[in-house]
């Protein structure tokens, strides 16, 4: 049961996001990789343990192309894939032309700012 708790939490976040609920709490970092294969490998190797995944990507010897993603840098979801019963989104980030793959629903782009109301004359 302990092994399934991180997976259950991840599924809850994914389902909540799919239903329009807020994405993952700001205090919990979201890991994104430029390669979907590397993200899947990281998740498999760390068995979904966020602390282990963070330690892996922060290791100077890591060449996975993964990092934490800040919500403020996300501009849009550019791609979506579902593999092996799990869904993934590729997020466009400010300052880079390469999207970063994350577990679907773990982070959504910021809401667009409303345009200022035009005054009637």
Image (cartoon, rainbow, N blue to C red):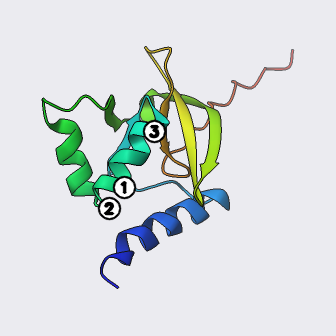
Residue 101: x %, y % from top left: 49, 37
Query: From where the camera sits, is residue 20 visible?
Result: no
Residue at the image point whose x is 21% and y is 54% from the top: 52
Does 74 sit above or below residue 121? Answer: below
The kind of secondary structure element at disc 2 is loop
Q: Which residue is mark 1?
A: 44
The kind of secondary structure element at disc 3 is helix
Mark identifier at residue 21: none
Which residue, as the protein is rendered here, is positioned at the far right? 121
The answer to whether the residue labelled 3 contacts the one labelled 2, judged by CB atoms less than 8 Å apart, is no
- In the rendered image, the quadrant that contains the C terminus is top right
Dot 2: few (<14), some (14–19), or many (≥20) neighbours within 10 Å?
some
Please indicate whether residue 59 sits to the left or right of residue 100 in the image.
Answer: left
The answer to whether the residue labelled 2 contacts the one labelled 1, judged by CB atoms less than 8 Å apart, is yes
Does 91 sit above or below residue 116? Answer: below
Residue at the image point whose x is 48% and y is 51% from the top: 106
Q: Nearer the viewer, residue 111 or 6?
A: 6
Give the distance between the C-alpha atoms of the residues marked 3 and 1, in whole angstroms.
10 Å
Residue at the image point whose x is 30% and y is 54% from the top: 45
User: Which numbered disc flags the more N-terminal residue, 3 or 1?
Assistant: 3
Residue 56: x %, y % from top left: 20, 44
Which residue, as the protein is rendered here, is positioned at the far bottom? 1
Residue 92: x %, y % from top left: 54, 26
Q: Which residue is mark 2?
A: 47
Q: Which residue is mark 3?
A: 37
- In the rendered image, the quadrant that contains the N terminus is bottom left
Dot 1: few (<14), some (14–19), or many (≥20) neighbours within 10 Å?
few
Q: Nearer the viewer, residue 78 or 118?
A: 78
User: Which numbered disc flags the more N-terminal residue, 3 or 2?
Assistant: 3
């Amino acid at each position: 049961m302990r092994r399934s708790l991180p997976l259950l939490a991840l599924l809850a976040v994914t389902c909540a996001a799919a239903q329009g609920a807020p994405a993952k709490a700001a205090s919990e970092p979201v890991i994104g990789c430029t390669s979907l294969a590397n993200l899947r490998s990281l998740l498999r190797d760390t068995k979904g343990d966020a602390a282990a995944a963070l330690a892996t990507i922060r290791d100077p010897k890591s060449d996975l192309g993964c990092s934490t993603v800040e919500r403020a840098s996300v501009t849009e979801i550019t791609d979506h894939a579902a593999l092996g019963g799990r869904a993934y989104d590729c997020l466009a980030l400010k300052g880079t032309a390469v999207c970063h793959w994350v577990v679907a629903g773990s982070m959504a782009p910021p809401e667009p700012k409303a345009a200022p109301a035009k005054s009637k004359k």
